Amino acid sequence: EIISAINADGIFLDTMDGSPEYFRKKLNQVKKGIVLESEKEVAAELIKDHHLSWKWIPTYNDGEAPGVLWNKWFERRHLMHMTNRWAKDHSSELHTAWMNGCGMIIWDNIFGSANLYNERDRSILRLMAPVQRRYHAVFSGEGWEPFFKISLPGVFASKWFNNATTLWTLINSANTDRDGLLFSIRHISGTKYFNLITGLETGNVKGDTAYITDSIRSRGIGCILAVKKEGITLEFKQFLQRQQVVYSKY
C-alpha cells in the first residue's frame, strides 16, 4: 500500500542482509523494478534481485590497500555504498569506494549527533562524484582490473575499460604526498591523457610508450583517462574546467 501510494523507487532493508523471495514477488505485483538495498552485504544468491547493499568499513581491515568487494566483483552492476558513521577520518571508505567503483553513505547526523566530514574528505567527495557519474557506464561494466601495477609506494589503482573508455582510479594510502611515475602503457596514436581530478592534461609520450607521471596528495585520490582526440569535445573541456575549480579549493 505504501509503495503504491507514494510510487516509491526502492526500499532500504534496515538492519537486514536481504529479504525473502516472496517479498520480491509481492512487490512485483505492485510495481516492477523496486530497488532493494540491504544494510549488510548480501549473499551471492540474492544479488539477482537486490540491486544495492551497504558496506560497513569497520567490519574489516585490509591494511595499506583497499580490498576488492566481492559483491561488486560478482555482479558489476551491483551498487554498494561505503559507510563508517562514527569515523572522524573517512578517507578509508572513500578509497575503498574509489577503487571499487562504489558510492558513499553521507551520514553526518547520527540520530541527532553531528559528525561532519572534515574539509579534505569533503573535497575528495566533490572531486570523486562527478567522475563516477560521468563514467557510470564503465564503472558498472565488465572491464575492471583491480590492483593495476603502480610504481609509487603506497599508491594503488584499479583499471576500468570498455570499447570507448579506459581510465584508472588511484588512491594514495600514505600520509605524505606522492609524485612521480605512476605507470607506463603502450601508446596508441591519437590518444591523449588527462588527470580527471586535477582537470589537467598529463602523460609523456616517447615512441610507442606513454609515461604517466603525476602527483597525488596525502590520503588523496587520482584518476587518469586515456581518450582519443575526437573525444575531447567542448563538453569534456567544460567538465575538466569544473574539476580544476574544485581541485583549486582542495
Image (tube, rainbow, N blue to C red):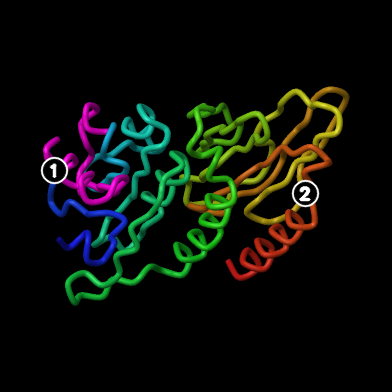
Quickly name the residue at label 2. Answer: 201
Q: In the visual, does 11 lie left or right of 64?
A: left
Which secondary structure, mark 2?
strand
Which secondary structure, mark 1?
helix
Say whether residue 24 is magenta.
yes
Q: Which residues are magenta?
A: 18-47
Label tally: 2
Type of residue at label 1? Phe
Say whether residue 45 is magenta.
yes
Pointer 1: residues within 10 angstroms few (<14), some, or many (20+)? few
Name which of mark 2 and mark 1 comes first in the sequence: 1
Q: Viewer-proximal residue, 120 or 40?
A: 40
Residue at screen point 30% across, 69% down: 108
Residue at screen point 83% across, 41% down: 229
Residue 237 position within the rendered picture, expressed as x and y whole percent measured from the top left: 77, 57
Occupied quadrant, residue 20? top left
Pointer 2: residues within 10 angstroms few (<14), some, or many (20+)? some
Occupied quadrant, residue 18? top left
Is residue 82 depicted above or below 60 in this figure?
Answer: below
Quickly name the residue at label 1. Answer: 23
Q: Viewer-proximal residue, 76 or 30?
A: 30
Residue at screen point 32% across, 45% down: 33
Residue 239 position within the rendered picture, expressed as x and y whole percent measured from the top left: 69, 59
Type of residue at label 2? Glu
Q: Quadrant of the N terminus?
A: bottom left
